[in-house]
Image: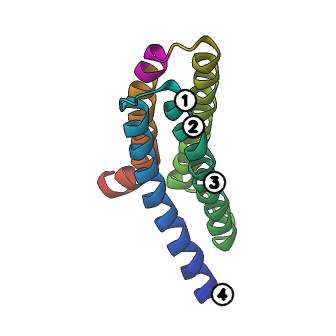
Amino acid sequence: MDQSYEFVLALHLYSLYASGFLIFFYLVLTQGNFKTEFIFTRRIRLFLPIYYFFLILIFFTGMLLLAFNHFEMTLNYWLMILSNILIFVLAIFHFKQFKKARENRRYIFFRWISFLILPIEILLLFLPFLFKKFF
């Protein structure tokens, strides 16, 4: 069981770091200038499944770690669950905004929303670590 726990913990931590990088990369994608609208939307649409995969991997490995700890809920676990839920809600809202921008072919508002939402997602992703370290 110790090896399984350590493996899942390592997978969880690396998934968190990868997700932080992917969120930052997504921010760069949404704020970058591209020659055509097609290139802009294609890059985002190709990127989103990878981004969502890592978000789901974080949630799944977090639930496995919780099971390994016999579902003993601490404040840090509650904060992680709340952070994950808020990240998913923001990701859904962000995707809906992307769909609206693609339908209307107006990406200025989408870029502005991305500039607000994605840093909040990065903060929420690492909030449990900051909370555990400083409080």
Which range of residues does the magenta coloring cover?
107-112
Q: Given contact means CB atoms under 8 Å apart, are the residues at marks 2 and 1 in contact?
A: yes
Q: Secondary structure at mark 3?
A: helix
Q: Earlier in the sequence, mark 4 or mark 1?
A: 4
Q: Which residue is mark 4?
A: 1
Query: Where, by quadrant of the figure, is residue 119 drawn?
Result: top left
Residue 12 part of the magenta segment: no
Amino acid bearing label 1: Phe
Q: Position of residue 66 (x, y in %)?
A: 64, 64
Foreground pick, 59 / 93: 93
Q: CA distance from mark 2 to mark 1?
A: 6 Å
Which quadrant does the N terminus fall into?
bottom right
Classed neighbour count for the residue bearing mark 1: other residues with Cα under 10 Å, few (<14), some (14–19), many (≥20) = few
Q: Secondary structure at mark 2?
A: helix
Q: Nearer the viewer, mark 2 or mark 3?
A: 2
Q: Which residue is mark 3?
A: 53
Q: CA distance from mark 3 to mark 1?
A: 24 Å
Q: Residue at x 70, y 68 (%)?
A: 67
Q: Which residue is mark 1?
A: 38
Q: Earlier in the sequence, mark 4 or mark 2?
A: 4
Number of labels in the image equals 4
Q: CA distance from mark 4 to mark 1?
A: 49 Å
Q: Which residue is mark 2?
A: 42
Q: Earlier in the sequence, mark 3 or mark 1?
A: 1
Amino acid bearing label 4: Met
Classed neighbour count for the residue bearing mark 3: other residues with Cα under 10 Å, few (<14), some (14–19), many (≥20) = few
Left or right, 82 with respect to 60, comes to: left
Q: CA distance from mark 3 to mark 4?
A: 26 Å
Q: Given contact means CB atoms under 8 Å apart, are the residues at marks 4 and 1 in contact?
A: no
Amino acid bearing label 3: Phe
Q: Residue at x 52, y 46 (%)?
A: 79
Amino acid bearing label 2: Arg
